[in-house]
Image: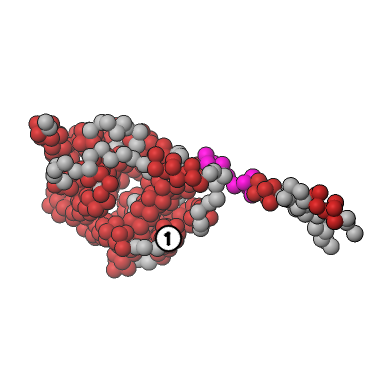
Amino acid sequence: MQNPRDATRNGASGSAKIPPIHLACGPAIAMPATLADSDNVTKLHQPSPERAAWRIALSCMLALSIAMGIGRFAFTPMLPLMLHEHLTDIQHGSWLASLNYAGYFIGALSCMWLHFTPTLIIRFALAATVALTLAMGLMESFAVWAIVRTLAGVMSAWAMVFSAGWGFRKLAELRMPSLGGVIFAGPGAGIVVTGLLASLNDALGWPARGGWLLCGVLALALLAVIWRTFVADMPVAVDATKSADAAKSTAAPSINHGSGESVIPVTILYSFAGFGYIITATFLPVIARQALPGSPWPDLFFPLLGLMVIPGAIIGARAPLSWDNRLLLAVCYVMQGLGVGIGIVLPNVVGFALGSVLVGLPFTAITVYAVRECRRLRGDNANGLIGLVTASYGIGQIVGPLVAAPLVAATGGFTTALLCASGVLVLGAVGFVWDWRRSLERAP
């Protein structure tokens, strides 16, 4: 038996030694010598802030790839295959697209009433997106498709809003908010992959349902990769107090708390972006196939558009806060307006390729600058305005395909619809420049 004095000496430091534990089926397991050592062992198994931040950014990027690139925009490259098999026509395809955008509109508005844990909503929305994507390949009823596409829009909105919000908050806590651009590269990455899958499906001669099933399986595989990230907040080896201070210091500053400037211009003009790009984003492969019959290129323009979204998201998020958001939006609108219309002037491979680049690059940057403008106008109370302009954008997206379908039916092509969309974008750019000049004239 140990001498009590020896025990006292061993514990003089306040840290009692813990003997190794012997298991009947294996070697002795040495336990941490002290509680402090136990904490150190725990920290060794926790990811560093940089590693955790990258994991969060990439997981949220893949979440948006599932929700937006697959759940929302897989319909675009799949539509030509569905038309070719006479599963639908342009009129009904336009309705399916608009129903999806209506679902997104409803989902975005409903986010303010969802009070569940963000990671729970993300997991549910992504799992539902997988199921709904697979359902498109298992059913061949317009009524069922209408319900599925509407629900897919709702799930896309939930996943988009909560993945981005949760991801940006975690990155701020980890003092790496600059990775936010990686998150918004997700839709572009998803568009690239779904576009290539649809092209592969067509090249192999598989039916359209095969393409939907491929997209669904891909979404399931991606979800399996990121699922654990959204199960619970990851422990990170960083001081909690410092993280909280960092989150406050990295939060975007309020440029203007509201000095009487009207919110009407940004609310109305943001809907022009939704209307202007959505016809191209919905019908680009169909338009290209009509202009380039027999060419192998039409199915590659939409993946190119998605590819351009990735650098556009990363570069756009780094624009200095001192630059006027309205002028940035005007530049983006003009770029997209040229991208939408250039295929009319140059209905060849070069024209469609340039158009895809010009539409894709500012795709996410427009959202970034619109949110910044809301914060300039309303400062820390901008959430309501952000919701309002998001709804405005959604209305533009819903109306776009509904306007395009009768114009295509009346003219036999997309030229008039694309000219209309391009003109609306240019008009929106003029509106932002006018609002900027008006504010300069009113400045003291």
Question: What residue would you read off at disc 1?
Answer: 117
Residue at (28, 46) in percent of width and height: 380
Q: Is residue 387 magenta?
A: no
What number of labels is visible? 1
Residue at (57, 44) in percent of width and height: 237
Label 1 SS:
loop
Residue 5, position in %: x, y? 85, 53
Is residue 336 found left or right of 136 in the rendered image? Answer: left
Residue at (29, 57) in percent of width and height: 108
Is residue 45 found left or right of 408 in the rendered image? Answer: right
Say if residue 35 shows up in the picture: yes
Residue range corresponding to the magenta coloring: 42-51
Q: Nearer the viewer, residue 100 or 58?
A: 58
Is residue 220 found left or right of 411 in the rendered image? Answer: right
Which quarter of the rendering shows the N terminus?
Answer: bottom right
Type of colouring: secondary structure
Q: Is residue 262 above or below residue 328?
A: below
Label 1: few (<14), some (14–19) or many (≥20) C-alpha neighbours in 10 Å: few
Residue 261, position in %: x, y? 14, 42
Q: Amino acid at mark 1?
A: Thr
Residue 343, position in %: x, y? 23, 37
Q: Is residue 211 above or below residue 376?
A: below
Is residue 49 found left or right of 375 in the rendered image? Answer: right
Residue 141, position in %: x, y? 32, 67
Q: Is residue 45 magenta?
A: yes
Which quarter of the rendering shows the C terminus?
Answer: top left
**Residue that protrudes farthest toward the right in the picture:** 1
**Residue that protrudes farthest toward the front in the picture:** 5
Residue at (37, 66) in percent of width and height: 139
Say if residue 209 shows up in the picture: no
Q: Nearer the viewer, residue 430 or 336?
A: 430
